[in-house]
Image (cartoon, helix red, strand yellow):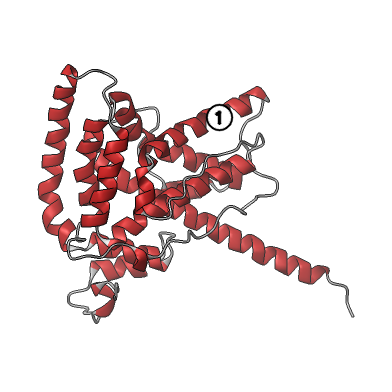
Amino acid sequence: MSRTPEFLTQEHDERDPSPWLALYLDQSTPLPDNVKSAWLADSSSGSRQYLLPFLRPLARLTIILIQIVKVFVPRNWSHSKLLHRFLAWGLTRFVSPEANWLILRHFHLGSQVLAFIGRNSPAPIATNPLEPADIDALKDEMFLKHDLNLFNFVIRLNTALRDKGLTLCKAEKVDFSMIKEPGLRLEDMPHGKLNFLDLQSAIELFTPLYQLMLTDNDFWRAANSLQLDETIGIYTATLLNAPEHLILVNNKHPLVPLSTLRAGHRLVIHGLSTEMLHSLLQRMQAAQKEGETETSLYEQPLA
């Protein structure tokens, strides 16, 4: 089954240029071509163009109503396992292959970025990687674990640094060994007749359900974990001594909690930021290997 986006099959018309083709060809955002193609195919879908404008306000209204209802619900009321089974079912039945592929990739890439920071920190720490092989693996409360992982990582990292009287600084020898392409294939994603829902629409639909079936603490933490994008970006830029790359990470200040009403949109930004950060690390990894190869050639004795 061909998944080539329409904007890559049409001829360029200077009188009516495709904005999606322009974004695909643009190289100012560090993304691999296959990821950018999938992202833009999802973004240019009919689902996002026609369905999302109706879903978004309804989803946000539902969040408000659920918040009112939860005032009268026991504080610890939660059905996380049922939630994740439902999410996995919805992703399998209704969400597009591109969106599902990007969602699964996110767990792998996020785990690799945290491992990169943990390994290169002057006070190294272990991480708990989440690497689902397929959608069914998400049933193991993967979304909830993802949020917990992020906050626990920040706490463990900074506790280790404080205990040793250290601060994060440029790594003397950067270890990129954990950075790799996940073994996930777009063609392996479900692609039935009903798999049409784009990533943003799916997130907007699932966010109220996430709120309903988790405790307020879990939902608030999930929404505000998105503001740690800048934090993770700063950690990475510090280790690499490359602060200029922070311009690509923008999901609001971590010390200023935002309303949960925009959690769906910000979750999409979170996913894109992770993809770009991982791509930057891959480029630097390749540059490091190339530099080592050149150095080894220069160090060879003359015949």
| Relative horizontal placement of residue 290, taking residue 136 as reference (left or right) | right
- Dot 1 alpha-carbon crowd within 10 angstroms: few under 14, some 14 to 19, many 20 or more: some
- As displayed, is residue 258 above or below residue 173? above
Q: Amino acid at mark 1?
A: Arg
Q: Residue at x 12, y 50 (%)?
A: 53
Q: Is residue 169 visible?
A: yes
Q: Residue at x 32, y 36 (%)?
A: 81
Q: Locate residue 274, reporting x and y percent.
A: 42, 49
Residue at the spot of label 1 = 156
- As displayed, is residue 292 above or below residue 301? above
| Relative horizontal placement of residue 287, taking residue 210 as reference (left or right) | right
Front in this rendered view, residue 273 or 127? 127
Q: Examine the image and state in which quarter residue 115 appears.
A: top right
Q: Locate residue 21, reporting x and y percent.
A: 29, 71
- As displayed, is residue 63 above or below residue 104? above
Q: Examine the image and state in which quarter residue 221 appears.
A: top left
Q: Is residue 257 visible?
A: no
SS for callout 1: helix
- In the picture, the quarter occupied by the C terminus is bottom right
Q: Locate residue 106, reporting x and y percent.
A: 40, 51
| Relative horizontal placement of residue 236, taking residue 145 as reference (left or right) | right
Q: Examine the image and state in which quarter residue 216 appears.
A: top left
Front in this rendered view, residue 200 or 139? 139
- In the picture, the quarter occupied by the N terminus is bottom left
- As displayed, is residue 206 above or below residue 224? below
